[in-house]
């Protein structure tokens, strides 16, 4: 255990330090949730700082690891990563400040001060997306020996980039989302601040654009974790000892994940709660699940099998 920890400590230091700070702020925000009973738009004022602290910590640890995989342009990647940390810090400082003031940090134009903070956050979000795009391009050019890991990292970072971009939908005007002093909203078809799911706060009465934003962003963690899991299972399941099989499974998972992002985006834009899908959403979800299951079965079926000394073994390419 000490070796992986020591190796992690050598990753991009500003990102790792900021991830540690965000872990601390998650604890602080959790304390705020326990002792501060103020509510803003139907949610505890410290819920947003808590969620953003966790998300930013995951983002920074993941990209610190991915940057460590680069073989070229390391200085450029380190510079871009430092810029990203700076703007993430600015964004989080505004979120925490507004929570302490009991004011909305996003979409709030009720005063000139709130509007200016919103503009700063909007600029930081643009920088975050452009910087993530730059790191993604560098990552796509990095050779990674294991095919499953290579696909998981590249496709995960690409889907994550789409997930980040989907956040822009929250700033577009739409029916049922216009409130005085507010530009944009999370919800579709209902005002922000209505009944929501536990922890996430996602609307239970209308569509919620935070869902595709969240799901899309975290492909960056989930697909590489899948590749690691498949590699670990290869010691127990002979069919997974073939790198080509693991790569096909990751490819199927990435296609299914991209389909899921598209599905929940479509659902949210139609003003439909995540847990109350209509018939069309259920049909689309069923087709997506069938496609993924078929892809998994096909990947396993195509695993090369060779006979040696009276028994079968899975060939390793």
Image: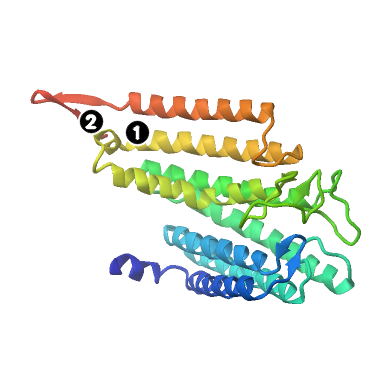
The residue depicted at 27 percent of the width and 26 percent of the height is: 304
Residue sitting at 64 percent across and 40 percent down?
Answer: 275
Tally of marks: 2
Helix, strand, or loop for circle 2? strand
Question: Which of the two residues, 51 or 132, is positioned nearer the viewer here?
Answer: 51
- Above-or-below relation of 50 to 192: below
- CA gap, disc 1 to disc 2? 10 Å
Q: Are marks 1 and 2 in contact (CB under 8 Å)?
A: yes
The quadrant of the picture occupied by the N terminus is: bottom left
Tell me which corner region of the image, top left, top right, bottom left or bottom right, holds residue 99: bottom right
Residue 60, disc = none
Say above or below: 127 vs 166.
below
The image quarter in which residue 119 lies: bottom right
Q: Which residue is mark 2?
A: 314
Query: Is residue 253 shown left or right of residue 194?
Result: left
Residue 55 image offset from top left, x and y in percent: 57, 61
Determine whether 309 is above or below 49 in the image: above
- The quadrant of the image that shows the C terminus is top left
Label 2 crowd (10 A; few <14 / some 14-19 / many >=20): some
| Label 1 Cα crowd, 10 Å radius (few <14 / some 14-19 / many 20+) | many
Q: What x and y, as percent, mark residue 301?
A: 34, 24
Q: Nearer the viewer, residue 278 or 227?
A: 278
The residue under label 1 is 245
């Amino acid at each position: 255990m000490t070796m992986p920890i020591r190796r992690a400590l050598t990753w991009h230091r500003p990102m790792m330090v900021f991830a540690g700070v965000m872990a601390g702020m998650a604890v602080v925000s959790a304390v705020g949730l326990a002792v501060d009973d103020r509510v803003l738009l139907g949610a505890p004022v410290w819920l947003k700082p808590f969620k953003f602290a966790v998300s930013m910590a995951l983002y920074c640890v993941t990209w610190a690891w991915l940057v460590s995989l680069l073989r070229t342009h390391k200085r450029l990647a380190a510079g871009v990563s430092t810029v990203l940390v700076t703007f993430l810090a600015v964004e989080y400082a505004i979120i925490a400040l507004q929570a302490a003031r009991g004011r909305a940090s996003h979409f709030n134009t009720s005063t000139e001060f709130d509007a200016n903070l919103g503009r700063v956050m909007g600029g930081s979000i643009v920088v975050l997306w452009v910087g993530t795009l730059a790191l993604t391009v560098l990552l796509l050019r990095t050779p990674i020996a294991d095919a499953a890991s290579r696909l998981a990292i590249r496709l995960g970072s690409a889907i994550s980039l789409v997930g980040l971009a989907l956040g822009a939908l929250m700033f577009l005007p739409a029916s049922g989302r216009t409130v005085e002093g507010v530009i944009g909203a999370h919800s579709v078809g209902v005002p922000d601040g209505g009944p929501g799911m536990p922890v996430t706060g996602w609307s239970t009465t209308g569509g919620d654009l935070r869902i595709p934003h969240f799901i899309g962003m975290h492909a960056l963690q989930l697909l590489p974790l899948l590749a690691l899991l498949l590699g670990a299972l290869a010691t127990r399941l002979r069919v997974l000892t073939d790198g080509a099989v693991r790569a096909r499974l990751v490819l199927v998972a990435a296609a299914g994940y991209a389909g899921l992002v598209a599905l929940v985006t479509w659902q949210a834009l139609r003003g439909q709660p995540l847990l109350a899908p209509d018939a069309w959403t259920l049909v689309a979800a069923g087709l997506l699940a069938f496609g993924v299951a078929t892809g998994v079965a096909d990947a396993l079926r195509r695993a090369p099998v060779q006979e040696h000394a009276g028994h079968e073994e899975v060939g390793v390419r």
